[in-house]
Each structure stands twice: as structure tokens, then as C-alpha cells.
Image: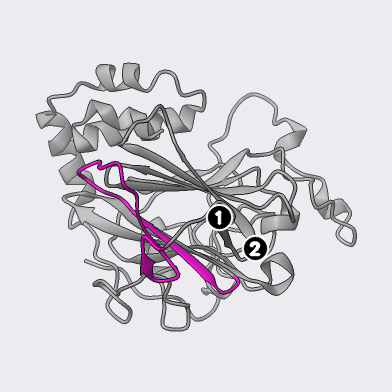
Amino acid sequence: GPTSGPTSGPTSDPTSGPTSPPTTAPVTPIIVPSLPDVPNSPDPYALSDLVDSAGSQGDPHFKTWKNEHFEYHGQCDLVLAKDPNFADGLGLDVQIRTKLVRFWSYIKSAAIRIGNDVLEVEGDAEGTVELRYWMNMEFQGPLLVDTTIGGFPIIFNSRDNNANKKIIQIDLSSKYAGAMIEIQVWKEFVKVDFKNPTLEAFGNAVGMLGDFESGKTFGRDGVTEIDDFHKFGNEWQVLPTDLMLFHKAESPQFPKKCIEPEDPRGERRRRLEESSVSVEDAEKACASLTDELDRKDCVYDIIATQDMAMAGAY
């Protein structure tokens, strides 16, 4: 059943945050930034070359600021990232809404607030050409060439005129060089990516993507490290103290906890045994992805959905 709710303070025996598996090869210096040596004068661009993006994939695979991948398959509204001081006090809130299907879930919609503007995007299982979105709570509100969110331009793209895939970009480069928030819609699946993230842009963000500088998955108190991702997901469920960004509320809302699969591992094993799609075929479909962890996520999604076309979501 659902795990306990958000923590209110440090645990008595906190464990360290998730780390990468040990290797026999020497660790390259780029993995361990030298920022602790100069705590009083951090370079706002020092971490930008560690990872070219962070965010969440439609079938919830989360990729932290440090490129650690993890899954959380509960159904609820989640705080992906938030920073009330973003862009000199405009503030940034990024929330996702997940939907449970058997032993896995997927991101069905995402909402982003910058300043007084809110953009919400929802997936569409029918794959229609029209994008399902709400601009400041108005369904398919007018979007002009110069439409902005908090003063940052919104760019609408599609890939190869494919009705299944739609791309919306929020260009942050007027304030943070090269930075961008990108939303991709693939059928009913929604993906949120923070492109070219820097310390200057997202160094103070908290939420499901962890701590920007350390990579640790902290609870809401900013101190407790949570390495159980079921607990971590429940920790970052949207609370009444968070802004409600979606145009309507859907169950569960706090104090109801996130709905989680009863036995995700058992269901996953059974599904693999009954699968009509082989792991080998899934691996071939995902072979073009250059990031090894992205390939693993892609294979998982194909097996879970039994849809070879899921590779197109990456």
C-alpha cells in the first residue's frame, strides 16, 4: 500500500543519497566538481557540462541533475522542480501528474509556472494533431508568435509532421544562456526536460530531481536524504502549501497519499514472461540512443507497454 507521508525533519539515522555503482576504472575529475574548494565564489556555469539535460520521461523515469536515473510509479501530482527565487524572484514551479496502469504509471500532464503565467500540457492517446494545452487556465487559449510565460518565449514545434509527437520549448536564454525547458508529448505520454541546466538557473531548485550541486535526493526539509524512491515520491507529492497549477484537481490529492502498484516487481516479472515483445527486439528499437541509461529506460517502456513504437518517445 502507500508509504508514509512527507517527513517533517531529519531521520534518526539518515542514509546517504543514491550513488552510481562502483567501477574498477578511475573516476574522472568531471564527476566530482571542485566547487567545495571555493564555497564563497561558485562558478554559475561549473556544473553545466556534467549533464546536458535533467527531467522526467513519460513512463516515470526521473533523471536527476547528476544524471542518475530512477523510477517512481505512484499516481498523484508531484513537484518536479520549484524555486521561488527563479529569475530574480519571478519564481518557477514545475509539476507533473501521473496515472497508474497495472504495475507502472506514466506522466499524463505537466504544468509550468513562471511569474504569473501557467502553461499546462496533456497527452492524447488518440495522437490527434491538435495539442491539448491550457494557457493560464484557458483551454487552447490564444498563442501568438510573441506569446511568453513569465516573459520567456514559448516555441511550438512538431517532429517530422508526426501527430504523435509534439514539442513545446520555453526559451530561458534571455536570462540563462542556452537554458531551456522542453515538454514533449508522445501520444498519452508527457516528458519534461531541463536542457543545458546550469547552477545559475537551477541551483536553488528542489523537488524530484534532487539537489543540483550534490545530486542528493533530499526531502522537503532540505536535510533528510531519502534513498527509498517510493518514500521520495510521496515526499514530493503536491501539498496544499504548493500552488495548484493544473486546471482541475484529480484524485488523489493530499492528505490522500499517492496510489502505488500493489506488487510492481511481481507484476513486472509476470508481464515479462507473458510478453509478446522480446527484450532483444526492444533493445534493437532503442539502439540509436547514445545514453546507456536512456536505452535501458526505453527497453523497459517497450516491455511495459508492449508497444515497439514507444522508442519514438525518446
* Callout 2 amino acid: Gly
Asked whether the beta carbons under mark 2 and mark 1 sit within 8 Å of each other, the answer is: no
Q: Position of residue 285 (x, y in %)?
A: 33, 20
> In terms of secondary structure, where does tag 1 sit?
loop
Task: Identify the residue at the far left of this view.
Answer: 274
Q: Residues within 10 Å of mark 1 (few under 14, many from 20)?
A: some
Residue 115 seen anywhere in this rendered image of the structure: yes
Relative to the observer, which residue lies in front, 30 or 313?
313
Q: Which residue is mark 1?
A: 17
Q: Position of residue 102 (x, y in %)?
A: 16, 50
Give me the disc on residue 155. Answer: none
Indicate yes or no whether the magenta region holds residue 136: yes
x, y percentage for residue 26? 70, 27
Q: Quadrant of the N terminus?
A: bottom left
Q: Quadrant of residue 151?
A: bottom right
Q: Which residue is mark 2?
A: 151
Q: Secondary structure at mark 2?
A: loop
Residue lying at 58% horizontally and 60% vertically, measured from the top left: 148
Residue 114 % position (x, y): 58, 67
In the image, the segment drawn in magenta is: 115-141
- Cα distance between the residues tagged 2 and 1: 36 Å
Q: Is residue 258 above or below residue 241?
A: above
Q: Residues within 10 Å of mark 2 (few under 14, many from 20)?
A: some
Picture residue at 65% right of the left edge, 55% below the top: 212
Tell me the residue at 27%/78% (across/down): 256
